[in-house]
Image: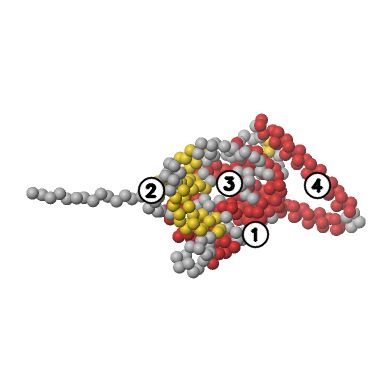
Amino acid sequence: MDQESTNLPAQIADALVSIPKGLTPGVVKALDRLVGASVDIPIAWLQQKKAKIDAQTESYKLVEASIAETVASGAGADPDIAQRAMNKLVRKEYRKQVNREAVASAMVEDLRDQSSSEENLATGSEPTSEVDDDWLNVFERYAEDASSERLQGLWGKVLAGEVRQPGRFSTRTLRFLSEFSQADALLFETFAKSAFGDSAPKNLVAPKDQENIGNLIYLEASGLIQGASGLGLQKTLTFNKDGRSFAREGNLIVVLTGEPEKKVKYSAIVLTQLGQEVLCLVGSRNARESAQAVAHAIRNPNIHEAHLGVLTDEKTGKINLMEVLWVKETPEAPIVEGSQD
C-alpha cells in the first residue's frame, strides 16, 4: 500500500506497506477509530470512504470541544477542582490512547504476518462489506482497557480477523473475550491443538478412563464446546458423488476419500459457534498440525485416503493439495506356490 503522507505512529505506518490492498478500507476505518490519525492513501476508489471518515472525525472534535467548554464553565467556582478533574481526565484518556494504539499496531502486524502465509492466502475475493460501526463501538471500549501485552495482542488478532472477514466475530464473542482469563486461555489452548474446524475427535481430547473430565466440563459450561458429558456426540462424514468429504478451517482443507454417497461416523466433541470464533485466536496453535492430528485420529477402514490442501479460489472451490496424510493399506495378494514335478 503506497502512502504519500501519514500521521500514524512509525511502527504502524511501516507495517502498512505490506498489507494487501483489498483490505485497505477496513484497515483505514479501524485505524481512524483507534488511533485517530488521518491516513492519506492515493487510491482513487478509497477517496470517498476516507472523506466520510474525515468528516466524522471533525464532528467528534467539535463535540469534544463543546463538552470541555461545558465542564469548564460548570466547575468555574472552584478552579482547583477543575484542574484536578482535568488532570485525571488527561491521564485516563492518555492510558486509553496508549492501549488503543497498541491494539492497532498488533492488528497491522497480524495482517502483515498472515498475508505471506500459504495457509492464509487470499482466495481471490475481497471483503464484501465494511467493518460494522456498531461492532467497532463495542470493540473500541474493550481495546482501550487492554493494558497488558497479552490482551493487546489478542484484541489485535480479533480486529485483524474482522477486517479480513467482516462479521467473523460476534459482539457476544467480544464480551466473552473481555472476561477470558489467562488460565482459561491455557485450558482452551490444550483442547484447541486437537481440534480442527468445528470439532475434535473424542479419542484425542477425552481421558481414556473417562473419569477426569473436569476440564472438558468447564469448557462446556463456558459455552465453548458441546458433547463433553453424557453420551457425547457423533460426527458424520458424508462422501459426495465423487467420493470426497471435506473439513475446513479458514483456507485449510482436509480432503477425505471414500465410497461415493456413503457416510462415516465417529465420536466427537463439537465446538460451538463461540468456540469456533475463539479457536482461530489461539496463538500457539498450528492449524496445519491440528489438521494432521485430527485426520489421523479419525482414520477408518471406510476412509481410503486423507490429504491436506489449501483453498486457492473461493468462487470455483479450487484446492491446491499440499500433503498426503495417509493412504489406506491394501493387503497384498497371497503368493501361491505351484507344485513341482
- Camera-near label (1 vs 2) is 2
Please report whichever mark, 2 or 4, sits nearer to the chain's N-terminal start. Answer: 4
Q: Amino acid at mark 2?
A: His
Give the distance between the C-alpha atoms of the residues marked 2 and 4, in whole angstroms. Answer: 65 Å
Percent across and percent down for residue 196 are 50, 52
Mark 4 closeness class: few <14, some 14–19, many ≥20 residues within 10 Å: few
Please report whichever mark, 3 or 4, sits nearer to the chain's N-terminal start. Answer: 4
Find out whether the residues at labels 2 and 3 contact each other: C-beta distance under 8 Å. no
Q: Secondary structure at mark 2?
A: strand
Which residue is painted at 71% across and 47% down in the image? Answer: 134
Give the distance between the C-alpha atoms of the residues marked 3 and 1, in whole angstroms. Answer: 22 Å
Query: Please, which residue is most extreme toward the front here?
Result: 261
- Disc 2 marks which residue? 304
Horizontal side of 171 relative to 218 (left or right) equals right
- Disc 3 marks which residue? 110
Please report whichever mark, 1 or 2, sits nearer to the chain's N-terminal start. Answer: 1
Give the distance between the C-alpha atoms of the residues marked 4 and 1, in whole angstroms. Answer: 30 Å
- Disc 4 marks which residue? 64
- Disc 1 marks which residue? 179
Q: Amino acid at mark 1?
A: Glu
Give the distance between the C-alpha atoms of the residues marked 3 and 4, in whole angstroms. Answer: 32 Å
Mark 3 closeness class: few <14, some 14–19, many ≥20 residues within 10 Å: many
Give the distance between the C-alpha atoms of the residues marked 2 and 3, in whole angstroms. Answer: 37 Å
Find out whether the residues at labels 2 and 4 contact each other: C-beta distance under 8 Å. no
Percent across and percent down for residue 311 are 50, 41
